[in-house]
Structures are given as C-alpha cells and as structure tokens.
Amino acid sequence: MAAVPQPQHTLAQAIYGLHERREADAWPRPYLGASILGEACARRLWLTFRWVARERFDGRMLRLFETGHREEARVLEELRALGMKVWDRQADGRQFAVEAHGGHFRGHLDAVVLGLPEAPKTPHLVDVKTVNAKKFAELKKSSFRQTYPRYWTQGQVYMGLMDLDRAAFIFVVKDTDEIHVERFEFDQAEFDKIMERAGRIIFAAEPPARISEDAAWYECKFCPFHAVCHGTAAPDVTCRSCAHATPLPTGGWRCEKRNHELAIDDTILACDQHRYIPILLEKFAEVIDSDGESVRYRNKLTGREFTNGDRPGLASLEIHAAEDKRALGDPVTDALRAEFDGRIVETST
C-alpha cells in the first residue's frame, strides 16, 4: 500500500513565502558592509561588493534574521529601563550610520550607550547579537576575537569611525535567553589595517586570490559564490561585473564606455554594452583578444571560440543564461541564433 503523504503546513509555508517575496524584491546592498568585513576570504567580499551573485536564504532563515533584529530593540529598551542613556537614532529618526571610501563602505550601529555598570562614565558602542547554545559554548571556551572575527572587526570599524574607545557586544542565547557581554577596546593599529583592507577590496579591478583552490575546502564549499568562483556559472549581469565600470574614490561609479558617472544605487541596471570582467569567466573561457568593443574567448570546455559583444557575438545576458557553457561557440546554437534572430535564454545538460 502506498504511504499516505503528510499534510502540508500551508500556513507555515505562506509565512516563509512572505519573507522570501520581500527579499526577492529588495535590491542588493550597494556598499561593502562593516558587518562582513571580518570575513577571512577577501575574494568573497569582492564578489559580494561586485554583485556577482545574490546570496539567497529560505523563508525560515529570513524570519530568523528578523528575530535577531527584534531582540536588539528588546535589549536596548531594557538598558533604558535600567537608567542608561541609549542613543540609537539620529535626530531625523534614522539609524546611526558610518561610512568611508566615498560611501562604498558603510555600517549601521545598534546604539551608543552610557552607564554600563562595568564602566559607567565611558560611552560604549553597543551591538546586540543572538547565538545558539553551541556557539555560545564555543565563545566561552575561546576568545571573542577568535570565535567571532567578523564581530570583532565590526566593532573596531564602528569605534574608529565614531571616535569611541570601548565596545560592548551583548549576546543573547536563543536556546536559554542567557545574556553574555563581551567588552573590548579600540585598537588604532588594527583599525588602520582593517580600513586599508576595505579600500583594497573595493577599488580592486579584479578579484583577489581565492582562499583555497580546492573547491571542496569547507570555506569554499558553503560559500554563496561557489558556482562562480569554482564552477562554470557566469556572474549576474550588472554594471559591477562589467569591465567598463570603476568605483570612484569620491563615491559613485564611472562607466568608461558611456563616459559618464553612475550613482552608487544605479549600478544594478546594466546596459547592452556590458562586457564581463574576463577573469570572472576563467573557469570556462580563456581570452584570445579584445578590440575595445568586444572580447573573444576560447571555450575551455570545447575548444571553440565565442565573443562577448554585439551580434553576432553573445550578449552577457546570453552567457549568463547558458547553464551548459558548452553551448557557447557551438555551431548549431550559432546557426539557430542567426537564422531566427534568437538569443540564448536557457540551456541545460
């Protein structure tokens, strides 16, 4: 007898779907965030900043992130109830923010608090984080910096850009509601190194080296850019993955092809002159030559040639759409495109 299928929890799925739709409608962050700068792999940070791909989360995880944000408000209200001074908004109601490198690097603070019992006369940068019991046990066993290098880096950035000397990261254990506080000092030398790293990543014309050339390495295996960095997926087609676009030290971007400047938020809308930064296609394509208008490649998977350029060349959107990159330069595919004025929309193995 066939097994009776389990009933679907339609309400739960509807709630998860709500969060997924909201996320799908949101534009990617137009800047490199202070909250992720402590990531070990500089290449991952560059790919994030260049919008090479979107990191996707299911509805359950998105809702969990929102739970963390709600805990922040709860803790800050508790600090106020204890008589501490809490500054978490500017005069216009917006969250406190910091930026550097022409606005290409930004971060948003939870709060600045005066009156912590450990040092009541010293204002502290305060950030609220939620953790599970397993990670909390690791935190107590090891140092804060070792367990959470991203948080430690985030704190140094905020202190340096807000001219503060102390930070307190408040951890709430989701499993037990236990509260743990990590206080640490500003380190000018480390701050300088961190900010130099941010600028080096932001203004690099090509991605930094991979943290590992082994696609199975744990930091690579679970990276949202694995398919582009170690596989044959092509980057999303935005101005930021285009060889013509350059981030400006004073803010915004410059399009060398169109000879004009782009606002930071405008770079998601690539034009038909988009040409991939060649190294981003290195896993399946090798540059043969370029005339300034198009780039000719040898397909490493087949040995055939194809061009990223105006017709009869391939638009970047076609290269991105080709799930099976062996279709690039394939004579049958090229003949069909020519005969029917067609485009590659999707291929599969």
Image (cartoon, rainbow, N blue to C red):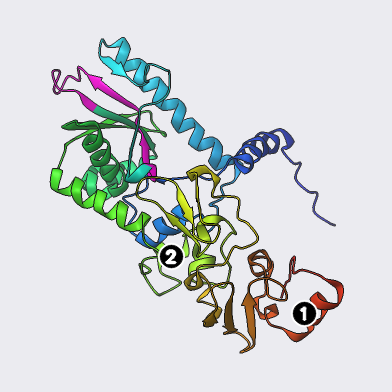
Q: Is residue 116 magenta?
A: yes
- Work out whether 107 lies above or below 52: above
Give the labeled residue for mark 1: 333
Q: Residue furthest front?
A: 259
Q: Is residue 344 left or right of residue 232?
A: right
Would residue 81 be found to the left or right of residue 274 on screen? left
Q: Is residue 120 magenta?
A: yes
Q: Return the x and y of residue 264 as percentages of the image width and height.
A: 48, 45
Q: Give the position of the N terminus as an image quadrant.
A: bottom right
Q: Which quarter of the image is occupied by the C terminus?
A: bottom right
Q: Secondary structure at mark 1?
A: helix
Q: Amino acid at mark 1?
A: Thr
Q: Position of residue 235 (x, y in %)?
A: 56, 63
Region rendered in magenta = 103-124
* Residue located 36% across and 66% down the image: 208
Disc 2: CA contacts within 10 A as few (<14), some (14-19) or many (>=20): many
Give the residue drawn at x 23%, y 41%. Answer: 156
Relative to the observer, which residue lies in front, 341 or 144? 341
